Image: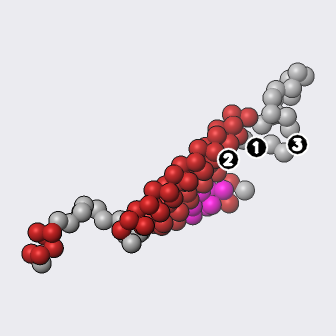
Amino acid sequence: MELVVASSVAALTAGGVYLILRMRAFAVIVGLALMSYAVNVFIFASGRLVVNEPPILDKYGDGIYTDPLPQALVLTAIVISFGMTAVLVMIALGSYLESGDDRIDLDGPRTDAEDGAQ
């Protein structure tokens, strides 16, 4: 089971990094979402999930329990990443409607003098 979880985290991370390195706004947003999913799965898997056991210690001292802290962290991270994805989509949509293209230009805006020189 650990191999499946580790492989899924690796695949999500690799896909996220690949999409973030693309030069299109939509691909970057999807890549960031994949990266957040990879982190969520990693944090969730670190919680030592045990089937049919309580999330707190038993009063009889059995010591087998599921840690509730990673589950709470992942739930919070899902809500925050959903909100940030919505903000990024709105920013990318506004940029697309203004420029007519979703390409990310790292050189900055071109001036009229630079356009005429080429």
Q: Which residue is mark 3?
A: 52
Alpha carbon distance from label 2 to label 1: 7 Å
Quadrant showing the C terminus: bottom left
Q: Is residue 34 above or below residue 60?
A: below
Quadrant showing the N terminus: bottom right
The percent coordinates of residue 15 (x first, y second) are: 52, 65
Residue 50, picture quadrant: top right
Q: Name the residue at 61% across, 61% down.
A: 7
- Tell me if 69 is positioned left or right of 64 in this view: left
- Label 2: few (<14), some (14–19) or many (≥20) C-alpha neighbours in 10 Å: some
* Residue type of the residue flagged with mark 1: Leu
Q: Which residue is mark 2?
A: 45
- Tell me if 30 is positioned left or right of 49 in this view: left
Q: Is residue 65 above or below residue 84?
A: above
Pointers 2 and 1 in contact (C-beta within 8 Å): yes
- Label 3: few (<14), some (14–19) or many (≥20) C-alpha neighbours in 10 Å: few
* Residue type of the residue flagged with mark 2: Ala
**Bounds of the magenta segment:** 5-12
Alpha carbon distance from label 1 to label 3: 9 Å
Label 1 secondary element: loop
Q: Which residue is mark 1?
A: 49
The percent coordinates of residue 116 (x first, y second) are: 11, 75
Q: Is residue 9 magenta?
A: yes
* Residue type of the residue flagged with mark 3: Asn
Q: Name the residue at 76% across, 43% down.
A: 49
